[in-house]
Image (tube, helix red, strand yellow):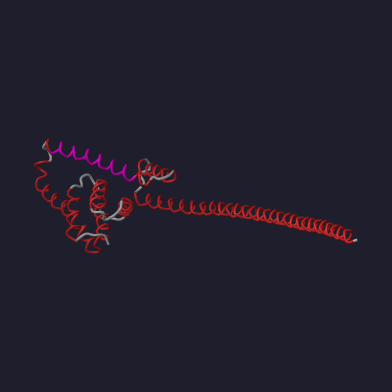
Amino acid sequence: MANGTINDVFLTFFRTGLLTFGGGYTVLPLLQREAAEKKNWITQSEVMDYYAVAQCLPGMIGVNAAILIGYKVRGKAGALAAACGFAMPSLLIILLIASLIQNISTIPLVQSAFAGIRVAVCALVVNAIYTMAKKAVIDVATAVIAIAAFAAAVWLELSPVPLVALSAALGLGLSLIQGKWGKGVAGVAGAAGDADAAGEADTTEVAGDANAAEDAGDAGDAGVAGVAGDAGDAGDAGVAGDANAAEDAGVADDKAGEGR
């Protein structure tokens, strides 16, 4: 559960209910500011999810959304505190206005005040829609769903329940299609990567065989050179030995001649 006491939940939604003018749609920017930005009880995505579910449930949208958020913060007690806090300002104000409506409804200043409130509410709703659209509409598919849902709500006057259910089905279908397509692309990429790795391994093996053959050739050349060197050394030694023997024989002959 998110951090927050029962009193905190009650006061937060009391303030939200006190500033909600113009119907259930005006509660959206207030929930976004109070529950998501200030308290960090829920995320911006959860604001949209809870609001969509609240529209599909019977009862007031604001109270339904408050119950969902309060339940996440403090469980059943939080849901009860959120519902009471959100509904109490409306109850008190309606009781007060009901006793004075006949006297103040025709006052120009009161009518002008409510006209200004309605304009401000429209601005708040537009700002909330723009903020959520930046997070919800992330690709072509979600943009198509958003445009189709808007057209169905405006021109076909489709109620929120089938509209939300149909959008959920489309989102689920697109997710499944994209998941299968992504797996297929990943499989093809993996096969191509395996082929490249196999080709690199074959090239490395051929290069290794060539290097081994080259090394063997160098060793053979060295062996031949060594044998030739040994033969040369032996030949030189033989020639030197023959020369020394001939020289010794000449000296012996000279000594024999002197003895005679």
In the foreground, 186 or 65? 186
43 in the magenta segment? no
Name the residue furthest bottom: 76
In the foreground, 87 or 235? 235
- For residue 115, what is the image quadrant? top left
Percent across and percent down for residue 185 are 54, 51
In the foreground, 97 or 165? 165
Percent across and percent down for residue 227 are 76, 58
In the foreground, 27 or 257? 257
- Residue shown at 27%/43% (left/top)? 125
- For residue 88, what is the image quadrant? bottom left
In the image, the segment drawn in magenta is: 110-132
**Is residue 63 shown left or right of residue 198?**
left
Percent across and percent down for residue 220 are 74, 56
- Residue shown at 76%/58% (left/top)? 230
The overriding secondary structure of the stretch rendered in magenta is helix
